């Protein structure tokens, strides 16, 4: 989207300043209208404050409910996750003791024997 030229925004600012000045001049020359407008604005602000307080109270209530729900749902999930991690740790320790360590020993012995045989074959060929 193309931005508006600077002169356009200057004209908009001047028009807004002129309208504000005219409005304040109107209120200055008619104090009764200013008093009515003041009363209307006070009522509107109080209604707005009441609405804001109601919405804030509702949001705090919903936040408390969300925290309670999360505690009810997350704690069992964390408990099951801890049980699963303990099972995985036990399984990996068992496999390490019973499968990986003996396999590594056999492989390292086989590699040593293969190296010794290669060295022996080289010596015999020389």
Image: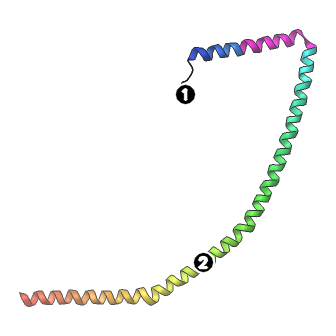
Q: Which residue, given by chain and number where applicable, does mark 2 sit on? A: 84
Q: Which residue is mark 1?
A: 1
Tell me where residue 53 appears, x and y as whole percent.
85, 43
Residue sitting at x 89%, y 21%: 37
What numbered label is drawn on residue 82? Answer: none
Q: Is residue 101 above or below residue 3?
A: below
Residue at image point 90% right, 11% down:
30
The structure's colour scheme is: rainbow
- Which residue is outermost to the left? 126
Quarter of the image containing the C terminus?
bottom left
How far from the left and from the top, in percent, is residue 21?
77, 12
- Position above or below: 69 against 52: below
Query: Which of 126/87 is in front?
Result: 87
Horizontal and vertical percent position of residue 122: 11, 86
Indicate yes or no whether the magenta region holds residue 68. Answer: no
Q: Is residue 121 left or right of residue 114?
A: left
The residue positioned 83% from the left and 40% from the top of the image is 52
Please give the range of residues in magenta. 17-31
Direction from residue 60 to residue 31 in the image, left or right? right
Q: How many dots with numbers?
A: 2
Residue 125 occupies quadrant:
bottom left
Snapshot quadrant of residue 120: bottom left
> Please, what is the dominant secondary structure of the magenta stretch?
helix
């Amino acid at each position: 989207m193309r931005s508006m030229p600077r002169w356009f925004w200057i004209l908009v600012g001047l028009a807004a300043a002129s309208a504000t000045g005219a409005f304040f001049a109107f209120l200055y020359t008619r104090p009764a209208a200013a008093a009515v407008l003041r009363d209307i604005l006070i009522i509107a602000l109080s209604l707005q404050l009441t609405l804001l307080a109601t919405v804030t109270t509702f949001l705090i209530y919903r936040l408390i409910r969300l925290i309670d729900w999360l505690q009810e749902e997350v704690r069992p999930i964390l408990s099951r996750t801890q049980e699963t991690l303990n099972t995985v740790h036990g399984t990996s320790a068992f496999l390490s003791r019973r499968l990986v360590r003996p396999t590594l020993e056999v492989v390292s012995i086989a590699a040593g024997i293969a190296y010794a045989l290669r060295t022996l074959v080289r010596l015999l060929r020389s």
